[in-house]
Amino acid sequence: MLNVILWILRTGAPWRDLPRRYPPYQTCHRRFQKWVTEGVLESVLAALTRHLRERGELDLSECFIDATFVVAKSGGGCVGKTKRGKGTKLMAMADRCGLPVAVHAASASAHEVTLAKETLEVQF
């Protein structure tokens, strides 16, 4: 299941486009949602990050941060109702080698400079 989630995160493909070698996309998506809700995914990513740091394979000497806009007019549990139904901004930070080290979701109403600071505070 972790391979499925990592494949989705790496490719950015919709769940319905999962390769046939994986279980049905509906099953995978339900498991992903459960893992996010229960904090399992965050724990797994934090453990992987610690492991990479211990091995010296996480290079934070240079990092990259980027954002994308997601339509979510009703907001969500972590974001709340958005201003004028704008949606949500997702910000992600990767190390020098492209390994993700932080992800943050917030209302699209906030300026990206503010979201960048909040993303840096969420590092795994």
Image (cartoon, rainbow, N blue to C red):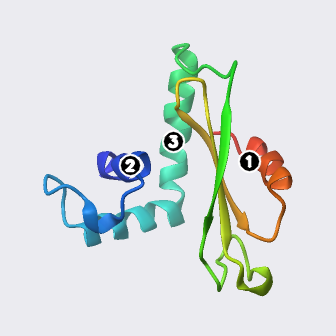
Q: In whole angstroms, how far apart are the C-alphas of marks 1 and 2? A: 21 Å
Badge 3 crowding class, 10 Å Cα cut-off, few under 14, some 14 to 19, many 20 or more, is some
Amino acid, disc 1: Thr
**Residue topped by disc 1:** 119
State left or right for residue 34 relative to residue 77.
left
Amino acid, disc 3: Leu
Residue 11 is tagged as 2
Q: In whole angstroms, how far apart are the C-alphas of marks 1 and 3? A: 15 Å
Mark 2 or mark 1, which is nearer the start of the sequence? 2
- At 68% from the left and 41% from the top, the residue drawn is 65
State left or right for residue 11 relative to residue 69.
left
- At 74% from the left and 83% from the top, the residue drawn is 81
**Cβ atoms under marks 1 and 3 closer than 8 Å:** no
Q: In whole angstroms, how far apart are the C-alphas of marks 2 and 3? A: 17 Å
| Quadrant of residue 33 within the rendered picture | bottom left
- In what quadrant of the picture does the C terminus appear? top right
Between label 1 and label 3, give the one nearer the viewer.
1
